[in-house]
């Protein structure tokens, strides 16, 4: 297999791994939290004394079905990440890709241990850490997909390093605010602390403002890659805000309108879980935005340095 073909297949496998991670352990984990089914089994890695692969999963009750499905999906992704790391180290894909693939396997392993510790110690704080760490793992997978893509090496540089530094600053600010908002959301879902009820809904305005500014600056930067990241982020932040309003509606209803929330209804489970999943997608996209802006900006600096060095050599030769 030639290097370009190997890199293309590595990229496809990375896409598959990241997609299945979102659809399987991330989505089922969100549903587990919504149903409060995280402690439906008191043991781990076994389930009610059964070996993980021997548990009668398909005939189990709803909460057991979802939680055990979450465990099986985590095992599946773990095996895929081992294969991803082996694949990366077996083909000529660059040192960065090899390091990222190894880091993905290591973080997925840690994520599994965090899930087990949450069950064995029965700590909601560990459930919060488990959920937040999952966002970091998923973001790392997305970065790996990005750097193994065919267009990564051909990405354009920023037309102005001045505007580039400004865009990078706003990208970092957007990432920081989205990360804080994601943390507040996790505190609200897992710990249900009083201050989070007040801060989380209103703090959502902060990343909304920064992402709009970031998108405006991205249009001026002259980089198609950054513009795509910015527009995707704007769409996700707005969608997440609307899902937040929908989550409030299905959880608490609107008593003044005669709307009473039905607990554990299908709509409540779907909307609340989707709010968590889209939140992770939003955080991941903000990470990719910082990586894209930083890489394009550093490439512009490298281009400037190369021109300066070449110009100096020409001038030296002329003298």
Image (spheres, grey):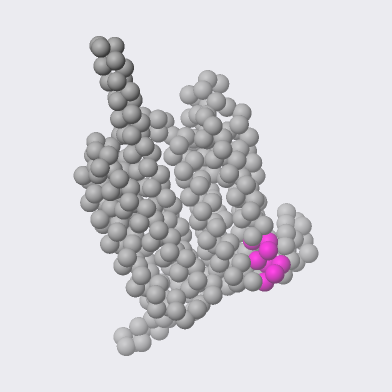
The answer to whether any part of residue 266 appears in the image is no
Name the residue located 40 percent from the left edge and 84 percent from the top edge: 260
The magenta segment? 115-122
Q: Is residue 5 left or right of residue 81?
A: left
Among the 4 quarters of the image, the one containing residue 174: bottom left
The answer to whether any part of residue 157 appears in the image is yes
Principal secondary structure, stretch drawn in magenta: helix
Among the 4 quarters of the image, the one containing residue 83: top right
Q: Is residue 297 left or right of residue 93?
A: left
Above or below residue 212? Residue 43 is: below
Above or below residue 46? Residue 156 is: above
Q: Is residue 296 magenta?
A: no
**Residue 185 rendering spot, x and y as whole percentages:** 45, 68
Report the quarter where the C terminus lies: top left
Report the quarter where the N terminus lies: top right
Q: Is residue 104 left or right of residue 4?
A: right
Q: Residue furthest right?
A: 49
**Residue 306 rendering spot, x and y as whole percentages:** 33, 25
**Residue 62 rendering spot, x and y as whole percentages:** 61, 68
Count of numbered circles on the image: 0
**Residue 217 rendering spot, x and y as whole percentages:** 24, 49
Q: Is residue 121 magenta?
A: yes
Name the residue located 41 percent from the left edge and 81 percent from the top edge: 252
Among the 4 quarters of the image, the one containing residue 40: bottom right
Name the residue located 33 percent from the left edge and 51 percent from the top edge: 169
Name the residue located 31 percent from the left edge and 85 percent from the top edge: 257
Q: Residue furthest left?
A: 220
Q: Residue furthest front?
A: 319
């Amino acid at each position: 297999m030639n290097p370009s073909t190997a890199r293309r297949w590595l990229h496809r496998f990375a896409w598959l791994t990241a997609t299945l991670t979102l659809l399987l352990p991330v989505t089922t984990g969100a549903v587990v939290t919504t149903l409060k089914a995280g402690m439906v089994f008191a043991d781990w890695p076994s389930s009610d004394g059964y070996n993980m692969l021997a548990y009668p999963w398909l005939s189990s009750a709803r909460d057991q079905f979802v939680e055990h499905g979450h465990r099986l999906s985590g095992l599946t992704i773990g095996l895929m990440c081992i294969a991803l790391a082996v694949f990366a180290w077996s083909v000529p894909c660059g040192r960065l890709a090899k390091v990222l693939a190894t880091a993905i396997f290591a973080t997925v392993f840690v994520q599994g241990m965090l899930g087990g510790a949450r069950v064995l110690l029965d700590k909601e704080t560990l459930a919060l850490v488990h959920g937040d760490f999952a966002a970091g793992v998923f973001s790392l997978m997305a970065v790996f997909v990005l750097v193994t893509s065919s267009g990564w090496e051909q990405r354009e540089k920023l037309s102005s390093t001045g505007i580039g530094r400004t865009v990078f600053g706003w990208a970092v600010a957007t990432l920081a605010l989205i990360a804080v908002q994601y943390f507040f959301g996790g505190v609200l879902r897992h710990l249900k602390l009083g201050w989070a009820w007040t801060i989380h809904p209103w703090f959502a305005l902060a990343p909304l403002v920064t992402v709009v500014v970031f998108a405006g600056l991205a249009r001026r930067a002259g980089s198609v890659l950054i513009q795509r990241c910015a527009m995707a982020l704007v769409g996700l932040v707005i969608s997440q805000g609307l899902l937040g309003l929908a989550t409030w509606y299905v959880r608490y209803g609107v008593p003044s309108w005669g709307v009473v929330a039905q607990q554990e209804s299908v709509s409540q489970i779907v909307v609340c879980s989707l709010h968590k999943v889209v939140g992770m997608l939003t955080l991941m996209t903000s990470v990719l935005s910082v990586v894209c802006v930083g890489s394009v900006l550093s490439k512009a600096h490298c281009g400037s340095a190369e021109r300066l060095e070449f110009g100096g050599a020409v001038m030296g030769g002329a003298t």
